[in-house]
Image: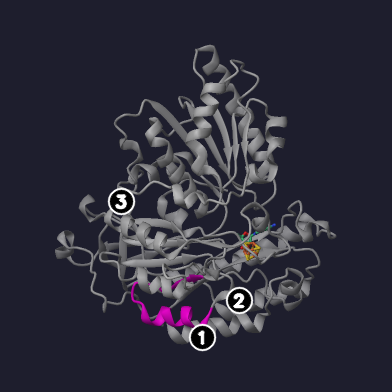
Amino acid sequence: MIICVCFNSFLRKLNCFELDLSLVCNIMASSGVLENPTGNKALFIKTYGCQMNVYDSDKMAKLLEPLGFILCNSASNADLIILNTCHIREKATEKVFSELGRLRKLKTEGFKNGRNVLLAVAGCVAQAEGSEIITRAPYVDLVFGPQTYHRLPNMVMEATNSLKGSEINGAGIIDTDFPIETKFDHLPTDTKSSTSAFLSIQEGCDKFCSFCVVPYTRGTEASRPVEQILDEGINLVKAGAKELVLLGQNVNAYHGLSKSGKEWSLSRLIRELAEIDGLARIRYTTSHPKDMDHELIIAHAEVPQLMPYLHLPIQTGSDRMLKAMNRKHDVAFYVKIIEKLRAARPDIALSSDFIVGHPGETDNDFADTIRLIMEIGYSQAYSFKYSPRPGTPASNLEQLSDAAKSDRLQTLQQLLNEQQLSFNMRCINTSQKVLVERRRDRDGRLTGRTPFMQNVSFDGPIRLLGELIDINIEQATGKSLFGKVAIKEQYSGHVIMNKNYSEGRKHA
Ligand code: 5AD
Ligand code: SF4
């Protein structure tokens, strides 16, 4: 799936997908990357996958600014092309190799015109495949994993100096370490931010679900120190962010160290971030049910900036499959958490991930998933056919047919789409607080999101960008809401930052 619509839609996507190139450039533009006055080299980044990759691509671009690289929105004239890859589902690797095949022509053309076009593969495919990439595509210059991109400026300089002058062979630099020093100690400070900014607080995962490559590609769980996160949060808000989206593969397992050496939980961190003057909204993703502790649930009731929306994947509604997936909890445990969340914050909107066709899944198991979805009622959710990933336990088991997976996926998505549409329809004739994030090129309309992560579009002047305003919702589809600015005076208003002010609406 290629997402090429808008920034909002990718924020709504909590899972893996491909990001359109120009979209990434828009994001970079909004964070100031296009404004490097000294730049005379063009950088093109194609970002695949999750929000973490978007965050990483943004940082790579900023790291390369001092070398004079300016982001551009096309690979054709770029001096450095980076594919920031995702390995979560099948064919990722093949897609990268076919993309490299296409890009090779640009490298060859550049060579004929006396230009050295550098080609880099970053992210989880780079981490998983390493030198295999250079073996299959010797014209690639750089291969580096998610933990070493802070060394990118050095790698680029090395590649530039060591170019062998051949259109066949690239510089062949590989860095897939899990270094002791962390990249976060070397990342540049944000001077300009988008209205909604990603803030990576945790990486990797120790859960080892049967189907998932993350523990192998992103490594075991690591939390960034509290101080570093607070500094980045404060900087982002100073640079224009009104919303922080805290990122981690298993974000609610966060247990970073404070200055005094104490471990902080995610809820404690959220409460501290909520003190940042000018920060209107906080979100976090992606969470595991086992790490949804009482304090975090209570934070949803007590911290007004914490939005009433939670992406809490369960993957399947069958106890048998939860066990097979090594999810470490059963359905009753998940349902209990949802009950507690709804007791704490009755209007909370819920999202999940579902996998159909994991090895061993029967019709009965699938029926259990459908029953659970009907019981919970989701505002949106993401669903995938199980895809065997090399090196993961489930990939060695007997596989279901693709036809069976497709049938189940279709049934499941139909139900989820109905739930999403009905959730959105219930907003018609209500007023929603919308944080205005961007102006759509297509029709000039402004777009933003409700507290519940729904995308809203409406007509309004550009000065509303970055504002939190009331929108009267008039129409709804499964994907979006449409409405009008509620009160004229708000055209010149500012974001409401009163700590006692609580966003949201109760659902009927
Ligand atoms: N096959 C299908 N879906 C997967 N996911 C992770 N690994 C796989 C796989 N091998 C999905 C899970 C996870 C989301 C990020 O991607 O639902 O929550
Ligand atoms: Fe993958 Fe499971 Fe960890 Fe999520 S909790 S990142 S699905 S191993």
Residue drawn at the location 65% of the way across and 39% of the way down: 95
Residue assigned mark 3:
445
Image location (x, y in percent) of residue 69: 40, 31
Disc on the earlier residue, 3 or 2? 2
Residue drawn at the location 79% of the way across and 70% of the way down: 362
Q: Which of the two discs, 1 and 3, sits closer to the camera?
A: 1
| Residue 93 placement: quadrant | top right
Image location (x, y in percent) of residue 316: 68, 71
Residue assigned mark 1:
340
- Circle 2 crowding by C-alpha within 10 Å: few under 14, some 14–19, many from 20: some
Residue assigned mark 2:
290
**In the displayed structure, does residue 434 sit left or right of residue 294?**
left
Q: Is residue 250 above or below residue 140?
A: below
Disc on the earlier residue, 1 or 2? 2
Location of the C terminus by quadrant is bottom left
Image location (x, y in percent) of residue 46: 51, 39
Kindly indicate whether the residue at mark 2 contacts the one at mark 3 (C-beta within 8 angstroms): no
The amino acid sitting under disc 1 is: Lys
The amino acid sitting under disc 3 is: Arg
